[in-house]
Image: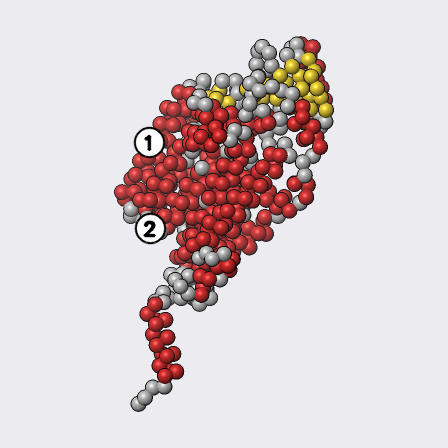
Amino acid sequence: MKIPASRLGRAAEGTIATETDTRTRIPGELPGPVEGGRSERRGLPARLGLGPEAVPYLLFTAFAIVYTTYALLKHRRMETHAYDLGLFEQVVRNYAHFRAPVSDIRDPGFNVLGEHFHPILALLAPVYRIFPGAGTLLVAQSVLIALSVVPMTRMGMRTFGNLGGAAFGIAYGLSWGLQSAVAFEFHEICFAVPMLAFGLERLLRAEYGPGVCWLLPLVLVKEDLPLTLVAVACWLAWKRQWKWAAVSAGVGIVAFVLVVFVVLPSLNDTGTYPFWGNLDGTERAGNAVPGASAASVPLGDLALGLPKHMLFPSVKWMTLFMLLLPTGFLALRSPLLALVLPTLLWRFTSSNQYYWGTAFHYSAVLMPIVFAAFADAVTSLRASRRDWLRRYAAKAAIVPIAVSVSLARDFPLMELLHKPEWVVPERVHRAEELLALVPDGVNVATTERLAPRLTSRDRVTAFPTVLPGPGWLAIDAWDGKQEWAKSWIDFMVEQQGFTRVASGKGVVILKR
């Protein structure tokens, strides 16, 4: 019997589709990219002549611009401070001139490697030597954090398809932990965020060697991050990757012991790791001072006290809730989520209340872990025998974007939508005119907001720490500090030999 040509054509098309698209498609799942097909030619990348592989880099560019704009506008409005932007600029400036990483803001002549271990900051020295100034650190941090969007978006595209992956990358870039870090001036963890993102991407692709290699430099970022490597080793052991588990655990344990028990004590005047005193058990024993040793606290007090302070006050529960909310709590299904435990342990056992909440930079390193755990959980859901779970997994990309957008109005980047954030107040212009009277290369004692304007050209200390000999004072009396400033200025004029040079809009310049 002769088969009509039209039917033969349709049959041939069906055969080709069966042979070329053998992946089992879950109901409701977005189709992935097909080479040369229409699905990769839709949207903005297609209009620009780009394929889906360009999406992660487009999002990186967009977030780098947004982060940088926010950070520089904040600095331009003089809303950055000596702690931590001015402090870290002094560190990087000393690295750039081949000197020890001393911060006179922290304490005159103080080597910051005796407090926190972050030699990776030396990588910024060449850039700072070419572009000196606090803005260089802000741009570097913005670009580094935005860089982590690339591997996270690729991870999302492999899990949810092109459109879902782009939504996943946007949700990650808008996540509250990253926004809080960008808003908090500068901190060394900006290096850890892309390391974790690239490393976790490789681990979830079962590329264990490259993944571990991405994560090993965490030991150069901060002294607590080697413990995250130990957590990675536990995950690798669960995957029966014994060789890489041994490498990760070995490097993590050795680095932590050397840094905390040898390097930091040798560079600190107290001869010990200065943050042992932040343990709640140490505080209750009356030793909550820098340099207090946890070893001096009865083990019974520590054993009974630390579990209690891990759970209370309730702000710690809210932090956990906010951490899991962007993933619809699906991240709990992935063993990868265990990587957040080392960071949460040191934060929640500390007596420092600033570590407990969602502000500042402390949760930035957790964002890549939580979002990677979410992607891993969705992949496992797709293997479920229950149809409703598979359908939910297929559409789960909408969860993080919906939550991140709904939370965004309460976090810093939304401030860019308001006109006042783009306007520099008149008092800032006047303050800059007065600071121009301070010459380069002199000793200056100054207050929080004025410090980052001077750290690139002078030796700056945090007022009222005043170095002996000739020097300058730059004091601001904004935000209800008038009485405080007046009493100090009178003291400096009458007792310390300073004379008033100029003043205006709440800023006073004095010289000795």
User: Mark number for residue 254?
Assistant: 1
> Residue 401 vs residue 472: left or right?
left
Out of 509 and 279, give the one closest to the viewer: 509
Out of 304 and 330, give the one closest to the viewer: 330
In the image, is residue 227 above or below residue 98? below
Q: Amino acid at mark 1?
A: Val
User: Mark number for residue 206?
Assistant: 2
Residue 227 shows up from this direction: no
- Circle 1 packing at 10 Å, graded few (<14), some (14-19), many (20+), is few
Name the image quarter holding the N terminus. bottom left
The residue that appears at 63% across and 43% down in the rendered structure is 415
Say which element carries label 1: helix
Residue 429 in percent (x, y) is at 68, 30
Mark 2 or 1: the one toward you: 2
* Mark 2 and mark 1: Cα distance apart in space: 25 Å
Name the image quarter holding the C terminus. top right
> How many labels, in total?
2
Residue 120 in percent (x, y) is at 42, 32
Q: Amino acid at mark 2?
A: Ala
The residue that appears at 52% across and 44% down in the rendered structure is 64
Residue 259 in percent (x, y) is at 38, 27
Residue 260 in percent (x, y) is at 40, 27
Instruction: Determine whether label 2 and label 1 are within 8 Å by CB.
Output: no
Say which element carries label 2: loop
The residue that appears at 65% across and 14% down in the rendered structure is 511
Please tell me which of labels 2 and 1 falls first in the chain: 2
Out of 3 and 451, give the one closest to the viewer: 3
